[in-house]
């Protein structure tokens, strides 16, 4: 069994302009990296040029702006994160790649819809993003998408030796965006055997860079697994936890080594605060527990149990909880049309007046949030239709 160490919690003290950072894509390449120097830094190979991205789409409304904060309707928010079809069809693949990387909800959508705390769960979150963003739908159709992505991935500049944790977090998530795209069969199908071998070497080279940055855990490891590498990664432990009536519920016992890198946690916190200003951040992003575990099993932020959906249904299938026509503090909420659970805090009945109801929930691999119940975007990232309120049925 792996030794459990204390996990690090990073609390966001301020929001940084994450979306203002635009990486230069023609600076250096991590391919064929040499051994580390005496200071532990990695020496890059010579650079090569990338294609022009002047026709990339600039999203007019971005997180952190007053227009973004003013969103009241999920349709408005999602529309602002789409590319107009007449522009999308004419855009070069190079411009399309840059557009996809700059999509405002790219990583929050993946993180908040991660179904399981592993590479398969990350793929699930990516599939949700594909269903919501026409830019990725178009990119997956382009036969030259893999070639263009590989060109740019090789050219990502390394963080400077004096880089801050925020800058390293930017670097990590920028790499992650390419790496989750490379894991898609549609992208790999456009690569030659030679390019696929080059991609394998490049993924391994980037992983060595992350090791040098002490950031090879969490998403770095999961994305390597998703790309068919790191077959000996640590496994999750299957356990059961009891319902109030004692019925066993299948769950996963998370380990400290499963946690995301502290710089990834900080970046996740900042993304959430920027993108969901109508909700209140309460506790850091973590992979140690999820919404179902928080709502039904243990509401401590030290919780280390993850309950995959639909296993949470056993809490009401055994009669421990029953549907309630009213809502009081502490009652459980099941989003029947989405893979989400929450705890009611105060206000009106969520199904009839979601604007007047307040609840608390854990957002996938994201943070613990206090937010209006059942409003969907921009209040929370889940499907607000079909919330069922449950009360405890055990005396």
Image (cartoon, rainbow, N blue to C red):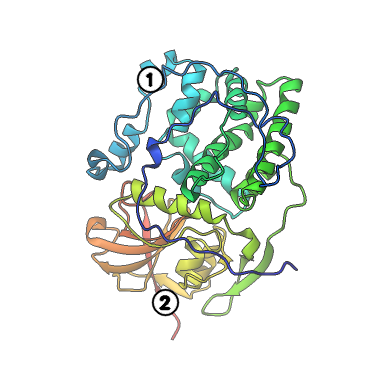
Residue sitting nearer the eye, 300 or 4: 4
Q: Residue furthest front?
A: 38
Dot 1 or dot 2, earlier in sequence: 1
Q: Is residue 365 visible?
A: no
**Horizontally, is 189 left or right of 126 in the view?**
right
Q: Does residue 102 lie above or below 237 as drawn?
A: above
**Horizontally, is 347 left or right of 311 in the view?**
left
Task: Describe the element under mark 2 as helix, strand or loop.
Answer: strand
The picture quadrant where one finds residue 329 is: bottom left
Q: Does residue 255 lie above or below 84 as drawn?
A: below
Image position, residue 149 (x, y; %) = 58, 25
Residue beneath label 2, please?
392
Residue 85 numbered tag: 1
Alpha-carbon neighbours of circle 1 within 10 Å: few (<14), some, or many (≥20)?
Answer: few
Residue at the spot x=58%, y=36% of the render?
Answer: 158
Task: Describe the element under mark 1 as helix, strand or loop.
Answer: helix
Residue sitting nearer the eye, 30 or 102: 30
Image position, residue 4 (x, y; %) = 66, 69
Q: Which quarter of the image is occupied by the N terminus?
A: bottom right
Q: CA distance from mark 1 to mark 2?
A: 49 Å
**Horizontally, is 12 left or right of 52 in the view?**
left
Residue at the spot x=56%, y=40% of the render?
Answer: 176
Image position, residue 337 (x, y; %) = 43, 51
Residue at the spot x=62%, y=32% of the render?
Answer: 182
């Amino acid at each position: 069994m792996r030794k459990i160490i204390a996990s690090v919690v990073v609390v966001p003290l301020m929001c940084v302009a994450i979306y203002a950072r635009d990486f230069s894509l023609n600076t250096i390449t991590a391919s064929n990296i040499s051994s580390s120097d005496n200071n532990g830094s990695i020496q890059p190979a010579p650079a090569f040029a990338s294609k022009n991205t002047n026709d990339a789409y600039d999203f007019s409304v971005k997180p952190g702006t007053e227009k973004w904060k003013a969103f009241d309707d999920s349709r408005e928010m999602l529309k602002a994160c789409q590319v107009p079809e007449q522009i999308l069809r004419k855009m070069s693949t190079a411009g399309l790649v840059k557009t996809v990387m700059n999509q405002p909800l790219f990583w929050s959508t993946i993180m908040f819809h991660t179904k399981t705390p592993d590479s398969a769960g990350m793929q699930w979150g990516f599939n949700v993003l594909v269903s919501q963003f026409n830019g990725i739908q178009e990119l997956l159709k382009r036969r030259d998408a893999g070639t263009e992505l590989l060109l740019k991935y090789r050219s990502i500049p390394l963080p400077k030796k004096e880089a801050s944790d925020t800058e390293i977090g930017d670097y990590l998530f920028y790499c992650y965006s390419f790496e989750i795209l490379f894991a898609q069969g549609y992208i790999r199908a456009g690569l030659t055997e030679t390019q696929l071998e080059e991609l394998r070497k490049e993924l391994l080279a980037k992983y060595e860079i992350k090791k040098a940055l002490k950031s090879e855990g969490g998403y770095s490891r999961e994305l390597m697994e998703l790309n068919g590498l790191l077959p000996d990664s640590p496994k999750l432990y299957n356990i059961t936890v009891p319902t109030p009536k004692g019925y066993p519920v299948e769950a996963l016992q998370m380990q400290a080594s499963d946690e995301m890198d502290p710089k990834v946690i900080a970046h996740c916190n900042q993304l959430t605060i920027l993108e969901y200003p109508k909700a209140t951040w309460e506790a850091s992003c973590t992979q140690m527990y999820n919404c179902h575990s928080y709502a039904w099993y243990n509401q401590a932020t030290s919780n280390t149990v993850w309950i995959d959906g639909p296993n949470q249904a056993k809490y009401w299938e055994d009669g421990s909880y029953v549907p309630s026509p009213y809502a009081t503090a502490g009652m459980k909420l099941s989003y029947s049309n989405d893979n989400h659970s929450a705890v009611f805090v105060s206000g009106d009945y969520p199904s009839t007046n979601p604007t007047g109801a307040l609840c608390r929930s854990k957002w996938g691999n994201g943070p613990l949030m206090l937010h209006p119940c059942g409003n969907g975007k921009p209040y929370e990232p889940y499907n607000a239709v079909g919330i069922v309120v449950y009360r405890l049925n055990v005396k």
